[in-house]
Amino acid sequence: MSRQTEYQALRDRHVPKGPSHATPAFIKEARGAVMIDLDGRELIDFAGGIGVMNVGHSHPKVVAAIQDQAAKFTHTCFHVAMYEPYVDLAARLNELSPGDFHKKTMFANSGAEAVENAVKVARHATGRPAVIALEGSFHGRTLLTMTLTSKVKPYKLGFGPFAPEVYRMPNAYCYRCPFGLRYPSCDVACADYLEEFFIGNVAPEQTAAVIVEPIQGEGGFVTPPPEYFAKLQAICKKYGIVLVIDEVQTAMGRTGKLFAIEHWGIAPDVVTTAKSLAGGLPLSAVTGRAELMDGPHVGGLGGTFGGNPVACSAALAVLEVLLGEGFLARAEALGAEMWRRFEALQRRFEIIGDVRGKGPMLAIELVRDRVKKTPASAETKKLVKLCYEKGLVLIACGNHGNVIRTLMPLVITDEQLDRGFAILESALQELPPAR
């Protein structure tokens, strides 16, 4: 019996079926953009632990920072005895996040916790209860963030009742416009619709926050047009609504910029980060305008493990890597090369209906018919399986599970990228042709 098979049996016996896995792999070692399973099989990683490993698996600077801090102490609880890495990292994020105004940052453990705290801050600041999210959004799995999340199965099925005062409006899904329009003649009606949304859904006077991902992660890498966020922000400002940008999956160089919202040229009131922030350790951040962040009373924000010193030290090392010479430029170049390759594949394979994203955070949407845009869900599932069998780890997303997204470590080598795309092309050739 192989070690893989042995541990699959142990997993089935001891771990509930609820936690899913995109592949059957058990990993014993990972470096850069390559993972090695228990049987010694090498896998090229185009998933990056769902966007967590932007600086690569086991980056030497991150590993050294973890080891150094762990040798000093691993926990005191910031609410009991404070420490330098928490304050140093907060100062760094305040400096680097978009917006030429005074900011403050608090830390939690996960993206969901960051979103929860961002909503708490917005509600406290405005005295209002309502939060508006978008169709296709994903914000976490806690009660509130599960409510904010759009997709029912698997994230919400059987877990209700849900949190009150959450409302959902259409997203900026240009490939499948919910308004039946086309960009740019649409004049970005999806953003202007917020004014109409206030009439029949929730009044602006009751709305604390609008929360949006710059590029929707689980929703299918839906990427708004250039004018979208400026319009949305103008409406929020008009009514005193806090604009929260959820950068849990999109920040830390994922799109070729430190924060994805930089592509749209706005500075949000509050931004949440997690995933790649600490290079694989559990850490999330809420960074926002100082007057908003200072609103909650002493003891109103926090948690026992939030801003763990080892995780904060890792995050400081991650930022050093990301801001090092050439890293973000390399990420931008990687994105341009990937876009070129995806467009070439789209010309060859009718099943690829759309290519979208920013920088190296790209996706292809698979359809059975380019005119009807019928989601090729089964084919996408088969494609992921074929790629895994050939040595490439991919993950799907989207409401219909028909979108392939790229979240590979940004340190991937040219040779690894070539091998990964060769596997993807080979797998696409084995799919039935689009009808």
Image (cartoon, rainbow, N blue to C red):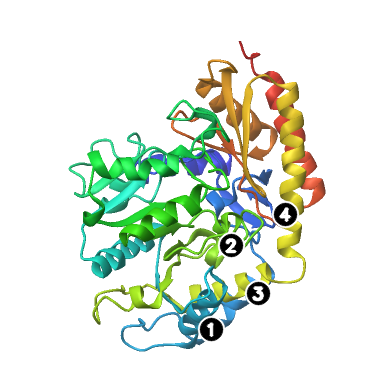
* Quarter that holds the C terminus: top right
First in residue order: circle 1 vs circle 4: 1
Dot placed on the residue nearer the N-terminal end, 2 or 3: 2
Residue indicated by mark 2:
252
Residues at badges 3 and 4 in contact (C-beta under 8 Å)? no
For label 3, the SS is helix
Mark 3, mark 4: which one is toward the viewer?
Answer: 4
The image shows residue 131 at horizontal and vertical percentages of 28, 53
| Residue situated in front as seen by the camera: 298 or 288 | 288
Residue of label 3: 320
Where is 210 relative to 401, above or below? below
Q: Amino acid at mark 1?
A: Ala
Type of amino acid under label 3: Glu
At mark 1, the secondary structure is: helix
> Which circle's residue, 4 or 2, is located before the other in the chain?
2
- The residues bearing labels 3 and 4 have C-alpha atoms spaced at a distance of 18 Å
Discs 1, 2 touching: Cβ within 8 Å: no
Dot placed on the residue nearer the N-terminal end, 3 or 4: 3
Residue 213 appears in the rendering? no
Assess disc 3: are there few (<14), some (14-19) or many (≥20) residues with their C-alpha within 10 Å of its C-alpha. few
Mark whose residue sits in front, 4 or 2: 4
Q: Which residue is mark 4?
A: 332
Q: Give me the disc on residue 71.
A: 1
In primary-sequence order, the first of circles 1 and 2 is 1
Vertical position of residue 163 compared to residue 87: above or below: above
Q: Residue 37 location, x and y as percent?
A: 62, 47
